[in-house]
Image: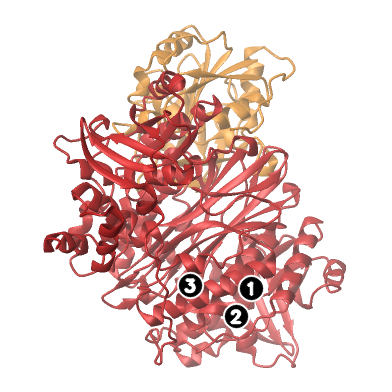
């Protein structure tokens, strides 16, 4: 008989009683305090992916340009000439909901560490944010502080924040989403893995000292629903120090440059516990760690606290004994603390010592690989999960194209993000060829003269309407953004933000969305190189919109021909290209009208969309188009207005009487559409590969739409610009 | 022409400055803990957050060993360019007049701005025409120039009308010392040296320095983007 207290403690730490029994079985005894703390974190959803791993295994992970796939700190793809680009996206949702500045800042810090842990120099950050409607004071507070936190960390460490997205929807009111993606550059031959190796090799902890911050962050914060008393969880949010991380980054890269390391790993969720045990698991070895050697920020920390602290800005490396001195010298030069805290053994056990005393002794496999994996029990919900949005545009105005256009341009999900992205350094590194709002994807120079394009996308509302097709659309839109600058996708990373997967309707959303992601990636031949899962995103008001966020890296051979959003030349023809079948279902206009979500989105011909991407990409690369922009939120007319504003040139659209439903045609949404401009013969040539409908020309200083020669929209650019600037008022 | 770019822990735009300098000459990195300036013809103090800037921008860097040598170099008439955080460091070191305060709106802002050359008769602007406009990005949270008793002759560049977002006194973007050999500039000329990334107007500053130093020669040490 075990004492009741063991199981009760385990439940308090986020485990189930059955899981506790499993731990006892594997240890063949009750775990002590250190062991239980370590198991509770390693068997948390955040570390073990116990509700998602089986689904993730269905995603395609092979591709001709793949260098490093899932399982490492970040994935990587080959970009030619011996260079690889590493990238990954990760969530920091619950910390940000509790303490937005530090939650977002440490989210950036963590994803940067993931990228330099494989030896890549971080060159770009993108972010994907979701908040409640900006009419809510709490949402404005969260937005303001999260943006400041992202800027604080990225700007101070000198990594350009080059892109991102933010959407406002009521279901994120309690539980905001803060996802950060990092892109890094590395010589392919210099990539380093995290597998510990070499019995007798030394384990060196370097970076910041260890404090009581972030204890239980991965289990009680990240792997549980948010509740009423979450201010109590502020102590589980870590504090970021970008200066410490800047030194850590330079120090790590110098250690690698000098060939001093066998393996490198960052300390993220679950701190020393996850980093050390995962290194041991990957290397098939054991580790012995003496917690008394870990430099502490505060006295009297118990061994279990040291093992699970989530103090930021720390790294763990393995080096040969002969190199220890040189490693510590490099650390000293960068004013980074470095300490030998243990060594590699052949026991395949994690042995934790406190000086002479063994305070924990567990099989590595039990801790890392033996967490039970659960089958989801998906069930499509019988009744709608989400309330209809509030009406913000009267039906009569929604039928008037001018009023609808102005309302859409000024709506929170479409208005200019300038007030946000201007708080980020988009230029440091001297590689940014396309900055925010100048193109659909950021374009970054590579050392050998070519360029990569990066984009991040996701649409919770459309996934909520149709998890399968919404997820397919998210992948297609990200690829469309790359096509608009002339880039071909090489790899994809994702962050799956969902509610509590133990509930059948959330399990259904998750299962359908992952099926959509996998099908879209296979259809585009783009491998998933890694990612992150964030579950339990629910507050008192119910689950968030299911929000798979996808980040993509693509390449373009010639940065001189990187595409632009803005119209560039008076007299250019304007066309809608691609197999767009506009529908108002789940569109931004439908949201403004207060329409409930539909049961499903329209079917997508993915092959036709892929063909359109190829046609646009080739035309941009060849320099035949003056501008290219994908049709997304707000439909064709919003896309045209965005091209006008980005290029500071007007447009005249002449629609004939066969236009059908004008409002649907102008504001309907769907995959596969592009607004392009260029010489008329270039658009005619494009029509050989993809449906092209010339709708007007670049002209003057206003946006006009005529139907049978009669003006239906006639708005000066200044008026459009004023509407588009609505978000800036939130920051006044 | 040999440029030396200072490197503090927390420097962010050091590699960018090195790339820019390498377009007109040789460019070496100078480590904050050293005192040897390696015989450079000019020193560039780059942007970033030296030592984290947690106390006050530039306050700690001013006391680094390398700055002792830079101060002596400047006092001997050597060319010193401080960009953004470098400008802050040079003010802290009293090599330049005034101080840089937090932006009026207390936010970091990254924006392409237009500058107007006030004084084209300096070692840093001798290739510009008076009144010429330069398109150069600015990005900072602490860039509001403040010097109540400033000699107006020391103003080298201003933000063009409508381009000053930080609240700087008289819209000043860059000032020199009385001798004219030290220049501090809040916007980032090193980010405006390549048409691919937006503008080449910043190159004028580095080329002016080479001209002033009278050291010309082939650029034999071009630095490419590496790790």
Q: Taking B147 as reference, is B212 left or right?
A: right
Disc 2 to disc 1: CB gap under 8 Å: yes
Quarter where residue A296 is shown: top left
Closer to the camera in the image, A223 or A683: A223
Closer to the camera in the image, B177 or A303: A303
Residue A669: give its label: 2
First reached walking from the N terminus: tag 2 or tag 1: 1
Q: CA distance from mark 2 to mark 1?
A: 7 Å
- Characterize the local packing of mark 3: few (<14), some (14-19) or many (20 or more) Cα atoms within 10 angstroms: many
Colour in which chain A is shown? red
- Figure colour scheme: by chain
Q: Taking A415 as reference, is A386 left or right?
A: left
Task: Look at 37% across and 86% down and name the residue there.
Answer: A387
On the image, numbered disc 3 is attached to which residue? Answer: A410
Q: Which chain is orange?
A: B
On the image, numbered disc 1 is attached to which residue? Answer: A631
- Helix, strand or loop at label 2? It is loop
Q: How many marks?
A: 3
Quadrant (top left, top right, bottom left, bottom right) of the C terminus of chain B:
top right
Task: Look at 60% across and 25% down and name the residue there.
Answer: B125
- Characterize the local packing of mark 2: few (<14), some (14-19) or many (20 or more) Cα atoms within 10 angstroms: many
The answer to whether residue A693 is visible is yes
Compared with A256, A42 (above or below) is below
Q: CA distance from mark 3 to mark 1?
A: 17 Å
Q: CA distance from mark 2 to mark 3?
A: 18 Å
Residue A503 locus on image (x, y percent): 35, 79
Chain ID, mark 2 = A
Q: Which numbered disc, 3 or 1, marks the residue closer to the eye?
A: 1
Closer to the camera in the image, A721 or A142: A142
- Helix, strand or loop at label 1? It is loop
Residue A278 locus on image (x, y percent): 41, 47
Q: Taking A309 as reference, is A207 left or right?
A: right
């Amino acid at each position: 008989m075990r004492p009741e207290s063991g199981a009760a403690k385990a439940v308090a730490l986020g485990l189930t009683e059955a899981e506790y029994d499993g731990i006892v079985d594997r240890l063949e005894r009750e775990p002590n305090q250190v062991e239980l703390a370590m198991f509770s974190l390693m068997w948390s959803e955040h570390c073990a992916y116990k509700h998602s791993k089986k689904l993730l295994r269905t995603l395609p992970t092979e591709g001709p340009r793949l260098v490093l796939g899932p399982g490492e700190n970040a994935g990587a793809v080959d970009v030619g000439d011996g260079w690889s680009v590493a990238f990954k996206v990760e969530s920091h949702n619950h910390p940000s909901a509790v303490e937005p500045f530090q939650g977002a800042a440490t989210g950036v810090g963590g994803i940067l560490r993931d990228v330099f842990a494989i030896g890549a120099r971080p060159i770009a950050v993108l972010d994907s944010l979701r908040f409640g409607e900006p009419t809510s004071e709490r949402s404005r507070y969260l937005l303001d502080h999260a943006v400041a936190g992202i800027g604080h960390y990225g700007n101070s460490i000198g990594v350009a924040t080059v892109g991102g997205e933010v959407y406002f929807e009521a279901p994120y009111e309690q539980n905001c989403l803060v996802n950060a993606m990092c892109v890094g550059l590395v010589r392919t031959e210099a990539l380093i893995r995290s597998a510990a190796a070499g019995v007798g090799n030394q384990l060196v902890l370097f970076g910041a000292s260890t404090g009581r911050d972030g204890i239980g962050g991965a289990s009680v914060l990240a792997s549980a629903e948010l509740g009423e008393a979450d201010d109590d969880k502020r102590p589980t949010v870590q504090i970021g120090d970008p200066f410490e991380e800047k030194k850590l980054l330079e120090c790590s890269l110098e250690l690698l440059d000098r060939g001093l390391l066998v393996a490198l790993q960052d300390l993220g969720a679950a701190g020393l516990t996850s980093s050390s045990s995962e290194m041991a698991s990957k290397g098939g070895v054991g580790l012995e760690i003496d917690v008394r050697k870990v430099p502490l920020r505060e006295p009297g920390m118990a061994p279990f606290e040291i093992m699970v602290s989530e103090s930021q800005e720390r790294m763990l490396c393995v080096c040969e004994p002969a190199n220890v001195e040189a490693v510590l010298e490099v650390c000293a030069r960068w004013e980074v603390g470095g300490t030998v805290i243990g060594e590699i053994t052949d026991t395949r056990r994690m042995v934790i010592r406190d000086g002479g005393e063994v305070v924990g002794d567990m099989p590595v496999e039990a801790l890392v690989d033996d967490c039970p994996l659960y089958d989801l029990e998906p069930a499509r919900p019988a009744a709608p999960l989400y309330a209809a949005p509030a009406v913000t545009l009267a039906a009569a105005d929604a039928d008037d194209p001018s009023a609808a256009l102005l309302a859409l341009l000024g709506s929170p999900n479409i208005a200019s993000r300038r007030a946000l992205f201007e708080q980020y350094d988009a230029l440091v590194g001297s590689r940014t060829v396309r900055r925010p709002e100048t193109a659909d994807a950021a374009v970054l120079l590579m050392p050998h003269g070519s360029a990569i394009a990066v984009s991040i996308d996701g649409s919770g509302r459309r996934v909520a309407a149709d998890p399968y097709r919404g997820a397919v659309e998210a992948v297609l839109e990200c690829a469309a953004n790359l096509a608009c600058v002339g880039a071909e996708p090489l790899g994809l990373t994702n962050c799956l933000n969902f509610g509590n997967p133990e509930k059948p309707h959330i399990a259904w959303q998750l299962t359908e969305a992952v099926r959509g992601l996998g099908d879209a990636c296979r259809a585009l031949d783009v491998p998933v190189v890694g990612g992150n899962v964030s579950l339990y995103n629910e507050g008192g008001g119910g689950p968030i919109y299911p929000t798979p966020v996808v980040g993509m890296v693509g390449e373009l051979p010639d940065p001189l021909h990187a595409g632009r959003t803005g119209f560039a030349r008076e007299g250019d023809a304007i066309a809608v290209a691609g197999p767009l079948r506009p529908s108002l279902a789940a569109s931004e206009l439908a949201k403004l009208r207060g329409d409930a979500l539909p049961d499903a989105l329209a079917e997508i011909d993915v092959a036709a969309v892929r063909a359109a991407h190829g046609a646009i990409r080739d035309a941009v690369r060849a320099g035949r188009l003056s501008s290219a922009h994908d049709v997304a939120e707000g439909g064709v007319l919003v896309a045209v207005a965005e091209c006008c504003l980005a290029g500071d040139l007007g447009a005249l659209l002449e629609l004939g009487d066969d236009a059908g439903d004008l409002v649907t045609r102008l504001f309907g949404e769907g995959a596969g559409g592009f607004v392009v401009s260029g010489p008329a013969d270039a658009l005619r040539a494009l029509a050989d590969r993809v449906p092209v409908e010339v709708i007007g020309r670049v002209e003057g200083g206003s946006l006009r739409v005529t139907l049978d020669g009669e003006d239906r929209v006639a708005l000066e650019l200044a008026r459009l610009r004023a509407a588009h600037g609505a978000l800036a008022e939130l920051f006044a | 022409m040999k440029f030396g770019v200072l490197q503090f822990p927390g420097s962010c735009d050091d590699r960018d400055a090195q790339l820019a300098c390498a377009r007109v000459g040789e460019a070496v990195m100078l480590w904050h803990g050293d005192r040897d300036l390696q015989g450079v013809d000019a020193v560039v103090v780059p942007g970033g957050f030296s030592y984290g800037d947690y106390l006050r921008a530039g306050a700690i860097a001013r006391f680094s060993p390398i700055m002792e040598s830079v101060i002596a170099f400047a006092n001997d008439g050597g060319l010193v360019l401080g960009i953004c955080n470098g400008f802050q460091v040079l003010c802290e070191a009293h090599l330049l007049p005034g101080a840089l305060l937090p932006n009026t709106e207390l936010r970091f802002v990254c924006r392409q701005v237009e500058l107007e050359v006030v004084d084209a008769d300096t070692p840093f602007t001798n290739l510009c025409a008076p009144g010429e406009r330069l398109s150069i990005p600015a990005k900072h949270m602490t860039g509001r120039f403040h010097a109540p008793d400033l000699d107006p002759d020391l103003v080298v560049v201003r933000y063009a009308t409508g381009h000053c977002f930080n609240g700087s006194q008289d819209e000043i973007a860059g000032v020199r010392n009385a001798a004219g050999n030290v220049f501090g500039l809040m916007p980032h000329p090193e980010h405006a040296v390549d048409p691919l990334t937006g503008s080449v107007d910043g190159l004028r500053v580095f080329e002016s320095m080479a001209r002033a130093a009278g050291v010309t020669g082939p650029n034999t040490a071009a630095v490419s983007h590496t790790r």
